[in-house]
Amino acid sequence: MKEEDWNRLDGRPHPKCVSFCGRDLRVGDRVRVWPKKGGDATDIVLAGKIAIIEEIEQDYEDKVHLALVMDDDPGRDLGITRQPGHRFFYHLEEVEPLDPK
């Protein structure tokens, strides 16, 4: 893989909002996580958990990914500061939008 391939997404704007299930989702919105079947152990542990959207990202194929931080994570502050192990990435189809608190 060429070095420029690793940097393709640098500087690419992050969507401010994405529509899903008739709702507009934004950073800070709450969702329930429902990972697709066949995931890993982390997906099993996080299934049904509530999270906030920390970032909305779009890859070079225009697929939307949500960076999530779990509400009940004792290291939640680390996820907010984008530290590894406390941010989890899911597709739109793997979340259920929740009503605002």
Image (cartoon, rainbow, N blue to C red):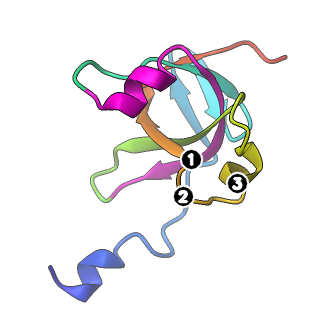
Could you tell me which quadrant the C terminus lies in?
top right
Span colored in magenta: 39-59
Residue type indicated by callout 1? Arg
The residues tagged by marks 2 and 3 sit, at their Cα atoms, a distance apart of 8 Å
Answer few, some or many: residues within 10 Å of disc 1's Cα (few below 14, many 20 plus, some between 14 and 19): many
CA distance for labels 3 and 1: 8 Å
Q: Residue at 47% x, 18% y: name it.
A: 47
Residue pictured at 26% horizontal, 18% vertical: 37
From the top left corner, tell me how far across and down residue 77 is, in percent: 77, 50
Residue 49 seen in the figure: yes
Residue at the spot of label 1: 87
The residue under label 2 is: 84
- Please say whether residue 58 is one of the residues in the magenta stretch: yes
**Residue toward you, 97 or 48:** 48
As rendered, which of 93 and 42 lies closer to the eye? 42
Q: Residues at badges 1 and 2 in contact (C-beta under 8 Å)?
A: yes
Residue occupying image coordinates x 69% and y 41%: 27
Residue pictured at 62% horizontal, 27% vertical: 24
Is the N terminus in the top left, top right, bottom left or bottom right quadrant? bottom left
Residue at which label 3 appears: 78
Q: Secondary structure at mark 1?
A: loop
76 left or right of 44 in image: right
Q: Position of residue 39 (x, y in %)?
A: 28, 28
SS at badge 2: loop
Q: Looking at the picture, which amino acid does disc 3 mark?
A: Leu
